[in-house]
Image: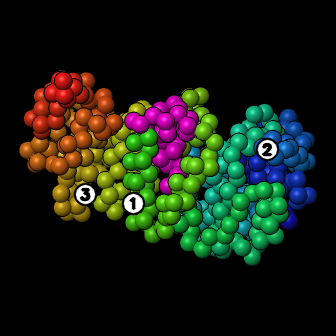
Amino acid sequence: MKHAILGAGAIGGLIGTALGSLVDDVTMIVRPDKLSSYPRTLSLERPSGFLTAPAKAASRLTYHVDVMWIATKTYQLEAALEVVEAMPAIVVPLLNGVDHIQVLRSQFGHDRVVPATIPVETERTDAGHFVERSPVRLGIAAGGEAMLKATVADLQDLGFACQFVANEKTLLWSKLCFLGPFALVTSASGRNLGEILSDPDWKAKLDSAFAETRAVAKASGAEIDRAKVQAILVMAPATMRSSMAKDHAAGRRLELDAIGGPIVRGGANYGIPVPCTASHLCAKMGDVSAAETALRDLFELYRTGRIAYLSSYREALVYAGLRSHKSAICALERAVDERCDLLIHLRIDPRWAQLRRVKGFDELANRVGIPTAGQIRANIT
């Protein structure tokens, strides 16, 4: 089979090297300024050993291929598609998120686009050299089985865990249900998976983000197996970090809209508040506009009657994520008047950690009747 890889970064390199090692015809589509210096051999460093493959590179896709794999960043997709001059038999996008599928189908046709996901930690350490740091799990929509069955079998022989999935929404959201919270939390915290799981505050934020994302996924029509998502956490190496976290640390552009956007927009669309995802994490990463959008969405849901009750407690969470401390305190005061039962968590919920240092917080907590740790110790003694 003839394959083209659009996007020669970490994911594209992993797929290209794996397919090339199977003696398939593989062309890496690279930027024109990289074409002359692109290496003639690809190499993939894996826990099980090394794979190498001959590298054939081009700056444009001018001839027919059986499969075009797309492995660009989502914000690079529109520009990347400009170099595709020949129609491939099928298009297999490995991008993050869910919204790119409609974009591709509007250009290539519905049946030609076969959604796929590839949750894996991999890096490009040099031109043509890639490192696989976690197990490869390749999920492909069942519509591509006839065309890709033999290729998938070969990849399984290399140790890839592959499956065809009938429900496209389940396929896409199953990855996002892990990736979204994981990417946001590792990026916001600057910590790897092991460090997050060992820190009660950050683990609580991760759990909250997981719960919000699962709720939106279910409302979107996806069938999410919570146990499988948790199993990924157990199987993943403690040192694992998301590519977004690495991009954030390096000051590169983030795929925040592709990864966090569907959760926030889905929450607004289905009337599911997602304050942890939209505000507490996004705002910490400097994307204040995402948190402000979440706040506007909450008000719009209430105004249009799509939610019957606008919790001042949730409103305060969004303000806290924005670090609008005065507004957060005001919203919590309204929550006290509303006798919100969630207020009992004020002194222990990690999402209020920053607000606890703000003037007025202790007074408000005392009104609710929640003693401080010092008061508890004094009463014991």
Residue lying furthest front: 381
Where is residue 29 shown, x and y percent of the image? 77, 49
Q: Is residue 196 above or below residue 142?
A: above
The picture quadrant where one finds residue 221 is bottom left
Specify the label residue 215 is tagged with.
Answer: 1
Q: Amino acid at mark 3?
A: Leu
Q: Residue at x 88, y 53 (%)?
A: 21
State how far apart marks 1 and 3 are (Cα).
17 Å
* Among the two numbered marks 1 and 3 on one chain, the one whose residue lies closer to the N terminus: 1
Label 1 vs label 3, nearer the camera: 1
**Which region shows up in magenta?**
176-202
* Mark 3, secondary structure of its residue: helix
Figure quadrant of the N terminus: bottom right
Magenta-drawn stretch contains 178: yes
Reading the image, the residue beneath label 3 is 301
Q: How many marks?
A: 3
Q: Residue at x 43, y 58 (%)?
A: 214
Label 3 vs label 2, nearer the camera: 2
Q: Is residue 6 left or right of residue 100?
A: right
Reading the image, the residue beneath label 2 is 46
Q: Amino acid at mark 1?
A: Ala
State how far apart marks 2 and 1 are (Cα).
35 Å
Pointer 2 and pointer 1: residues touching (CB < 8 Å)?
A: no
State how far apart marks 3 and 2 are (Cα).
48 Å
